[in-house]
Image (cartoon, grey):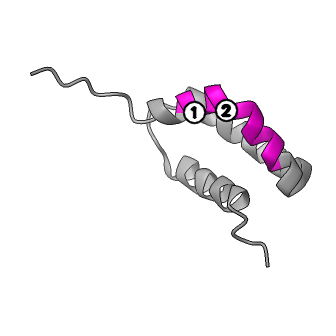
């Protein structure tokens, strides 16, 4: 009867709240200081955003590629 709609980024905000430090550590280990800075910026942007933007999607895809070792040969 009642449909509770969560904001579009609620799950992502919760994930970064719960696992942000681990994500930052992984980014630093896998991509060095530039990847850490990019990750910190992404986490801050997600915290302030009301809805996903093209930039957020692009940065999330970049972080996903780093964490899944997509560019490792």
The CA span between labels 2 and 1 is: 6 Å
Q: Is residue 58 left or right of residue 52?
A: right
Numbered disc total: 2
List the residue tagged with mark 1: 15
Number of residues whose C-alpha sits closer than 10 Å to that of mark 2, classed few (under 14), some (14–19) or many (20 or more): few
Q: Is residue 31 left or right of residue 18?
A: right
Task: Judge whether residue 26 is colored magenta.
Answer: yes
Q: Which residues are magenta?
A: 13-27
Image marks 2 and 1: residues in contact by CB distance under 8 Å? yes
Task: Judge whether residue 39 is colored magenta.
Answer: no
Residue 16 screen position, x and y as percent:
62, 32
Q: Quadrant of the C terminus?
A: bottom right
Residue 28 screen position, x and y as percent:
86, 47
Q: Quadrant of residue 70?
A: bottom right
Q: Residue furthest bottom?
A: 73
Number of residues whose C-alpha sits closer than 10 Å to that of mark 1, classed few (under 14), some (14–19) or many (20 or more): few
Element type at mark 2: helix
List the residue tagged with mark 2: 19
**Residue drawn at point x = 60 percent, y = 51 percent:** 60
Residue 3 screen position, x and y as percent:
19, 25
Q: Is residue 43 above or below residue 55?
A: above
Of residues 63 and 21, the one nearer the viewer is 21
Q: Quadrant of the N terminus?
A: top left
Residue 38 screen position, x and y as percent:
76, 46
**Residue drawn at point x = 58 percent, y = 34 percent:** 46
Q: Is residue 52 left or right of residue 62?
A: left
């Amino acid at each position: 009867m009642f449909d509770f709609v969560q904001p579009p980024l609620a799950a992502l905000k919760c994930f970064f709240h719960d696992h942000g430090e681990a994500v930052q550590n992984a980014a630093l280990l896998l991509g060095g200081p530039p990847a850490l800075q990019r990750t910190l910026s992404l986490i801050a942007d997600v915290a302030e955003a009301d809805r996903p933007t093209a930039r957020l999607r692009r940065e999330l895809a970049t972080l996903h590629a780093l964490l899944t070792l997509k560019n490792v040969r």
